[in-house]
Image (tube, grey):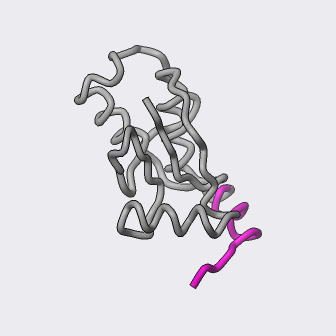
Amino acid sequence: MKINAYLKPHCGWSNGVRAILRKHNLEFEDIDIINNRANYAEMVQKSGQPLSPCVEIDGVMLADVSGEEVENYLLSNSLVKPTVAATDVPTNAGCSDDEHAKMATKTIRFF
């Protein structure tokens, strides 16, 4: 399975996606959309919209998703088996105040 995850370095939603992919021991490319303009542009072009996280699994784009939604997709398409393994962060939560503060110090405007 080829997984490209378009994620922010410090984001509750992005961390939830990472947690689900780790929970199922899936290899994925963690693509930074904050510090690399080309990565952000690629995500927007592929997903047709500007919101993140976006996860591309074997050519199928899941746009603006939580970790919980990614896991539901993987399970409902029999790409992974159910597991009772726990995650180290919430899989369906926005950014904490600390994560927002980290992003604010490195904000890059593309438009």
Whether residue 48 sits left or right of residue 27 in the image: it is: left
Query: Where is residue 82, by image quadrant?
Result: top left
Q: Is residue 68 above or below residue 31?
A: above
Q: Is residue 104 above or below residue 55?
A: below
The N terminus is located in which quarter? top left
| Residue at x 74%, y 68% (from the top left corner) | 106
Nearest the viewer among 31 and 84 is 31
Image coordinates of residue 47 in percent, x first then y, are: 38, 61
Q: Which residues are magenta?
A: 99-111
Query: Where is residue 71, by image quadrant?
Result: top left
The C terminus is located in which quarter? bottom right
Image coordinates of residue 102 in percent, x first then y, are: 72, 61
Whether residue 83 sits left or right of residue 32 in the image: it is: left
Image coordinates of residue 95 in percent, x first then y, are: 55, 55
Magenta stretch encompasses residue 23:
no
Image coordinates of residue 101 in percent, x first then y, are: 70, 64
Magenta stretch encompasses residue 102:
yes
Q: Point out the residue furthest to the left here.
A: 76
| Residue at x 58%, y 41% (from the top left corner) | 29
| Residue at x 47%, y 32% (from the top left corner) | 20
